[in-house]
Image (tube, grey):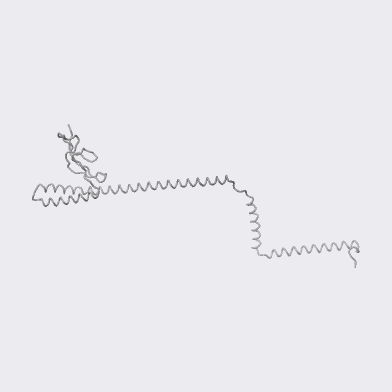
Amino acid sequence: MMNNQDLPKEDQLMDQAINENEDLKQNVQDAVAIEGDQGDKPLEERDAGGEVEQRQEEGCVRDEQPLPTVESLQQQLEKVMQERDEYLSLAQRIQADFDNYRKRNKNAIAEAYDAATADVVKSFLPILDNLERALDSAKESSSHEAIAKGVEMVARQFKDVLKKLGVEEIDALGKAFDPELHEAVMRAEAEEGVEDNTVVEVFQKGYKYKDRVIRHSMVKVAVKQ
């Protein structure tokens, strides 16, 4: 049997070309087979493979980013603490404003209640005046003694009710004249032993509710000439 070395040179070249052609055809067939296998895979698997590669690349990029320094972290912490203090201060101011508003509102309600009570009491005072006048008139006649006692009892009950409401009679007789409490409707020369500007007679009693004057006392004041 003849080998390639026994063949003429032209035949040897022909055999070498045939072998190289066979190798090339085999490589092409192998490449086509691999491509066919890849194409048979579902689209999701191929996309997933691409995503994995992309994530791996992004991970590498992130790994390459420098870590924050201690100074930068300290600055961020100080900024957050400053913002916290500002919000806390704002909350405290809002709370203080609300407390002040609540106090003002409470005081306004109390003042309105006191004013309403004083007005109601003032409307009853003429009744008490008439009761006391009837009592004084009845005491002058012995025949009206029973009536006088009845009127006196009603007047006393009425005064007790006023006292429970916080209404007090203004003490005027023998006191120094006070324009905040008294209304001088008459002046007279002071007698011996009487101080100047002293209330010597009360024509109509005055009353006050707590610190609020409901009605001034109508009085006569002694003055020295």
Number of labelled discs?
Answer: 0
Q: Residue 96: x percent and y percent? A: 40, 46
Image quadrant where one finds the N terminus: bottom right
In the current view of this chain or complex, which residue is farthest to the bottom?
Answer: 1
The residue nearer to you, when weighing 17 against 184, is: 184
Please indicate whether residue 62 sits to the left or right of residue 86 in the image: right
In the current view of this chain or complex, which residue is farthest to the top?
Answer: 225
Q: Residue 133: x percent and y percent? A: 14, 47
Q: Residue 209: x percent and y percent? A: 25, 46
Q: Residue 171: x percent and y percent? A: 20, 42
The residue nearer to you, when weighing 126 against 158, is: 158
In the current view of this chain or complex, which residue is farthest to the front?
Answer: 70
Please indicate whether residue 69 sits to the left or right of residue 125 in the image: right
Which quadrant of the figure has residue 180?
Answer: top left
Image quadrant where one finds the C terminus: top left
Please indicate whether residue 1 sits to the left or right of residue 194 in the image: right
Q: Is residue 153 above or below residue 44?
A: above
